[in-house]
Amino acid sequence: MSAGVVEAAETPVPEQGFERLFDGKTFDGWEGNLDWFRIEEGAVVAGSLERRIPNNEFLATKERFEDFELRLEFKALGDGVNAGVQIRSERIPNNHEMIGYQADLGQNWWGCLYDESRRKRVLAGPPEADRKKPVRLNDWNEYRIRCEGPRVQLWINGVQTVDFTEPEAGIARTGLIGLQIHGGPPCEAWYRNIRLKKLQP
């Protein structure tokens, strides 16, 4: 496939133990501000290329997860696009934000592990000069996210970007999964083929 060419999603090969979290047609099992999330071509589309996004928005699962491997595809569009996948996270009451780990994507944050609304910093990730290397810009990419005990690992397109072991006691090892679009200039993050395998804690 040539660079920049977007092909239709192929029928995925069955993966033992993985279950789909998103059926490609409805938001069953998910909740969020649907002014900023829609479904197109079997994908969740977060944000807009036509209007500025006033604040961070999240589409979150209703189910909570502890130890798991999450696999999904993402595509980031627009200048300054910033988005990510929340893991082991929670909704902040009466707020649009979530708190917890984020597998980052977009801008200069590709493949980093960020602590959203908690420590508010990058916990681990590749050197900045290397972050774009595994990414197919403006095209579909595979994110693999594995949480097992205190250990969080991230891969983009098969390239490992994070292997982080949480050093702080009291950091939650269970929570919701969320799809984020960051507040800022017009942009979109597309998410599809979202599937998860629960691991024994």
Image (cartoon, grey):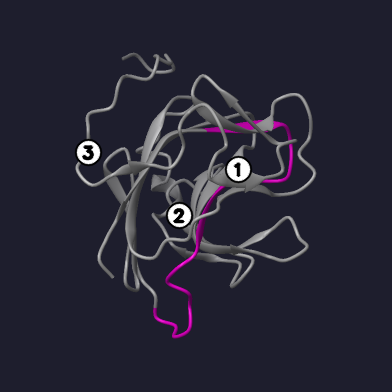
Q: Which residue is mark 3?
A: 15
Chain-order first, disc 1 or disc 2? 1
Q: Does residue 137 lie above or below 68 as drawn?
A: above
Which residue is most to the bottom? 169
How crowded is the residue under tag 2: few (<14 C-alpha within 10 Å), some, or many (20+)?
many
- The residue nearer to you, when weighing 22 against 97, is 22
Q: Which residue is mark 1?
A: 82
Chain-order first, disc 3 or disc 2? 3
Query: What secondary structure is found at the residue carrying circle 3?
Result: loop
- Residue extent of the magenta highlight: 167-190
Give me the residue at 33% from left, 58% from top.
68
Q: Residue 164: x and y, percent?
A: 35, 67
- The residue nearer to you, when weighing 85 against 21, is 21
Question: Magenta segment: does it hold 187?
Answer: yes
Give me the residue at 57% from left, 45% from top.
30
Q: Which residue is mark 2?
A: 112
Q: Residue 175: x and y, percent?
A: 49, 64
Count of marks placed on residues: 3
- Discs 1, 2 touching: Cβ within 8 Å: no
Chain-order first, disc 3 or disc 1? 3
User: Which quarter of the figure is the N terminus placed in?
Assistant: top left
- Asked if residue 181 can be seen in this view, the reply is no
Q: Which mark is residue 135?
A: none
Distance of label 3 from label 1 (alpha carbons): 29 Å
Query: What secondary structure is found at the residue carrying circle 2?
Result: loop
